[in-house]
Image (cartoon, grey):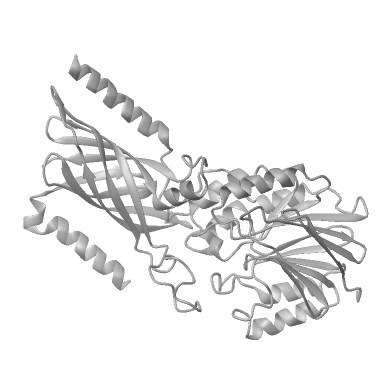
Amino acid sequence: MVYIKNWILIFCLCFFYEKAKAFWNPMIAHAGFLGQFNAGGIFHFDDNHSVELNMGSYEMDRRNFIQINFGYAYSPWLLKINKFAIEPFRFGPYALYALDNNNYFLQVPDRYVARNYYKQNGLHLALHFGAAVKYKENLRFILFTMILDDALVIMYNNPGERIDQTFISTGIILEWML
Amino acid sequence: MQKLVRLIITCLLIVIAIRCAPLRDSPYSSRLLRDERDLNNLNIAALSDIDADTKMNIAVFADSHQNYRDLRNTITHINRTPSIDFVANLGDFTNQGSNMEYDHFAKSYEEIRSPKFTVIGNHDALGAGLFLFDKMFGRYDYYFESSSHRFIFFNSNNWETPLKFQSLWLRDTVSASAKPVIIFSHISLVDPERFSNADGEIFKTVLSNPKVRLAVHGHNHTYRTYAVSSTWIVQAPRIEGFGWIMLEVQGNDLSVSLPKTGHREWYTLKTGF
């Protein structure tokens, strides 16, 4: 529970602290691996580099839980066509962290005999790639596909295995450009 | 013209991204993409007469984890093997008990043509695994009977599922049986790390019960046979590298064969019941 409060505090500081507020654009998402429903912010360093911090919800046994996600995106190209600004390809790493410390952990719980009895299961790393379209300078859609760390391990260990329907997900983000 | 080409490429990339994968849920959730539900009960209902001939053939595999290629090869081989009465999956078919792993395993599992039964492994119970198992396979502890035996599938993951671990259920289900019993579990009932307490005593009582003819488990990844209180215990190897076993029970004779090596061993089951 302490962990959850800390994370929520950090999250709030990022978006509601006056100075930070000036840089973060709010976003909502229906975002696959990032959570069924998701909200947060995107910070643009420039036209090519941005970071995303958001919270997503997921359901376990009819109860809702929160995960926190942090990612970086690099967009090498920007095409401007009339009212549209298009990033045909953007990609980068993502980190997903479950705030539910009962079912997910970074360090193996004490009841197990050894600290390495299990690999941590609370943190996932992922790669995302996709495209973005900005409309009239204030609305931006991002469509992405995300591949989890598990998928890369499975592809390495099982050459030729088709994992696209289980270990890869798509997602949609809507961003308001302030 | 150049702008138009770029626009078309962008549209194509967006379409590819959408087509590339479904919009699935968080890896932490207990939602499944596939619609298989309550598989163990469905297979019990579909079970034909195991004792139609005098010999009982049970294919056993365990600990497939994320070795999907070996799992598929093993299932192909099991499907080509004639006269299998049922297939027992002794758990650990995931690494982290995630929804993706359950979905991906189910794709191959559904290819098994014989009736098939799964017991939950310790890895399958991590994260949302306990809820996912309940959805996809049904109860954690269950049994079914042929005219000659009671087959018990028991959740032996005491550390991972403390609230669902029922050592007394196993003892009572064995005691209540009017037939000889074969027990399937993921972790050995005589695991010294896990069952050195009161549960260990209960399991000793279970294994010394004259009704229990055979116990089969996985978890340790290597093939091994040993006896406790005159009950033969078979430890199934992990599936990696085509490691599955065939148990053939005829009267009091048990034959264990490893298709990987062609190795076969014979044992005499206890006849106290």
- Which residue is painted at 12% across and 46% down in the image? A45
Residue A41: where, in percent of width, then height? 20, 49
**Res. A43 visible in picture:** yes
- Give the side of residue A114 with respect to residue A123, left or right: right
Q: Is residue B61 above or below residue A130?
A: below
Q: Quick one: which residue is furthest to the top in this view?
A: B1
Which residue shows up at 38% across the image and 33% down it?
B18
Q: Residue at x 86, y 77 (%)?
A: B210
- Whether residue A35 is visible here, answered yes or no, is no
Rendering coords of residue B239 (x, y %): 64, 56
Apparent side of residue B110 relative to residue A26 in the rendered image (left or right): right
- Please say if B72 is above or below B64: above
Q: Quadrant of the C terminus of chain B?
A: bottom right
Q: How many marks?
A: 0
Q: Quadrant of residue B149?
A: bottom right
| A132 relative to A149, above or below | above
Nearer the observer, B128 or A155: A155
Residue B243: horizontal and vertical position, in percent?
67, 56
Q: In the depicted view, which residue is nearer to us: B74 or B36?
A: B74
Q: Depth check: give the residue in front, B170 or B252.
A: B252
For residue B190, side relative to residue B18 (left or right): right
User: If the image is split into quadrants, where does the N terminus of chain B sit?
Assistant: top left
Please give the name of the residue rendered at 59% of the width and 80% of the height, measured from the top-left corner: B193
Q: Quadrant of residue B82?
A: top right
Q: Is residue A15 left or right of residue A167?
A: left
Residue A24, percent across and down? 14, 49
